[in-house]
Image (tube, helix red, strand yellow):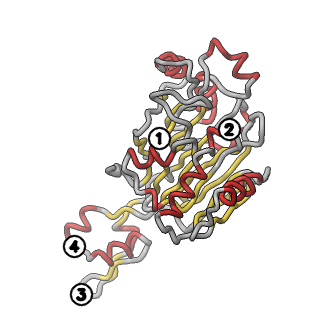
């Protein structure tokens, strides 16, 4: 699979609890620079990774939103495959507290002891950063579902300065000099003259972000956590005619998702977690677009650029 951007998400599965011939249980792969994050891992996720020719050995962090099977039944198979392929790198798994015991019991029952370390990180009701490095962070927040469920926000922390084309054309800096300038350093020309960084750079673009709202009913309390994100994924299990059922089952309609997107002032909205009852998803899209224009139906295998 070709990578279209430095920051994008690939949809591996977009169905709700009951899969269909054309839709698989929920899973997404988020790529930022050369970092790979797996978000939820429904049944058959590893087959989808293979189908779309994704370098899944690069996944070091997996985020499980909650303990309904369509969001984690594929995890034990992926862990086992990594073991069979001789993985040595640590694998970090972020999820509900009960996930660790379930996975460890399954591995023990299958007489499988991974050759690599499985490091579990239990999510709590606390809201905050659960993973970060110098450039990027992952933030968790609670959703409103029948069981404890979390959403995730992936956000850039910093972006490098942009160098003016006129400067590059005139001075032809080396790769090392370009990196230094992007990090804020001044430039020393061949005659020893210092050129101030501010005169040869532009301010970096706006920080980019992606929010993942897994299973949840309509709840405006999440808005503060996803406000102004570049791209929002929000579940849309039902159409508007099934609002009562959506509320009863703690799920959302397409219009619910669109209302959240609009009130949160997000850049774009993508919908998923579709009920198997829908052969044609256009109705869901139309209902959402009537409220929030920049709405798209997720397609398995499609990459959505975050820019």
Which mark sits nearer the N-terminus, 1 or 2? Answer: 1
| Front in this rendered view, residue 116 or 206 | 116
Q: Residue at x 37, y 73 (%)?
A: 179
**SS assignment at label 2:** helix
Which mark sits nearer the N-terminus, 4 or 3? Answer: 4
**How many residues crowd around disc 4 within 10 Å: few (fewer than 14), some, or many (20 or more)?**
few
Q: Residue at x 62, y 31 (%)?
A: 17
* Dot in front, 4 or 3: 4
* Dot in front, 2 or 3: 2
Left or right of 25, for residue 172: left
> Mark 4 = which residue?
172
Q: Residue at x 51, y 53 (%)?
A: 207
Residue 134, given in percent of the width and then of the height, sits at: 55, 68
**How many residues crowd around disc 1 within 10 Å: few (fewer than 14), some, or many (20 or more)?**
many
Left or right of 61, for residue 95: right
* Dot in front, 4 or 2: 2
Image marks 4 and 3: residues in contact by CB distance under 8 Å: no
**How many residues crowd around disc 2 within 10 Å: few (fewer than 14), some, or many (20 or more)?**
some
* Dot in front, 4 or 1: 1
Count up the numbered dots.
4
> Mark 1 = which residue?
11
Which mark sits nearer the N-terminus, 1 or 3? Answer: 1
* Dot in front, 1 or 2: 1
> Mark 2 = which residue?
223
Mark 1 to mark 2: distance in Å? 23 Å
Residue 45, given in percent of the width and then of the height, sits at: 51, 45
Q: Is residue 262 visible?
A: no
Mark 4 to mark 2: distance in Å? 46 Å
> Mark 3 = which residue?
191
Mark 4 to mark 1: distance in Å? 41 Å
Mark 4 to mark 3: distance in Å? 14 Å
């Amino acid at each position: 699979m070709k990578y279209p951007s430095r920051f994008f998400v690939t949809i591996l599965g977009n169905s709700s609890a009951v899969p269909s011939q054309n839709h698989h249980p929920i899973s997404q792969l988020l790529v930022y620079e050369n970092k790979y994050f797996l978000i939820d891992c429904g049944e058959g996720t590893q087959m989808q990774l293979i189908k779309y020719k994704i370098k899944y050995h690069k996944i070091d962090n997996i985020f499980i939103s909650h303990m309904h099977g369509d969001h984690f039944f594929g995890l034990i198979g992926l862990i086992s495959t990594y073991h069979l392929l001789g993985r040595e790198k640590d694998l970090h798994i972020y999820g509900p507290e009960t996930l660790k015991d379930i996975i460890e019991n399954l591995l023990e029952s299958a007489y499988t002891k991974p050759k690599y370390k499985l490091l579990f990180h239990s999510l709590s009701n606390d809201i905050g950063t659960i993973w970060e490095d110098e450039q990027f962070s992952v933030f968790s927040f609670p959703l409103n579902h029948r069981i404890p469920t979390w959403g995730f926000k992936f956000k850039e922390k910093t972006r490098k300065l942009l160098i003016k084309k006129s400067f590059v054309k005139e001075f032809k800096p080396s790769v090392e000099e370009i990196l230094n300038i992007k990090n804020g350093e001044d430039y020393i020309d061949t005659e020893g003259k210092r050129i101030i960084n501010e005169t040869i750079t532009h301010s970096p673009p706006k920080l980019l972000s992606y929010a993942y709202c897994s299973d949840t009913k309509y709840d405006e309390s999440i808005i503060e956590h996803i406000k102004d994100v570049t791209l929002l994924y929000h579940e849309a299990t039902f159409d508007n005619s099934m609002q009562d059922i959506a509320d009863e089952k703690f799920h959302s309609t397409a219009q619910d998702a669109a209302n959240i997107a609009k009130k949160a002032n997000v850049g774009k909205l993508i919908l998923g977690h579709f009920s198997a009852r829908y052969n044609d998803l256009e109705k869901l899209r139309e209902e959402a677009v009537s409220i929030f224009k920049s709405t798209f139906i997720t397609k398995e295998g499609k990459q959505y650029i975050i820019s």
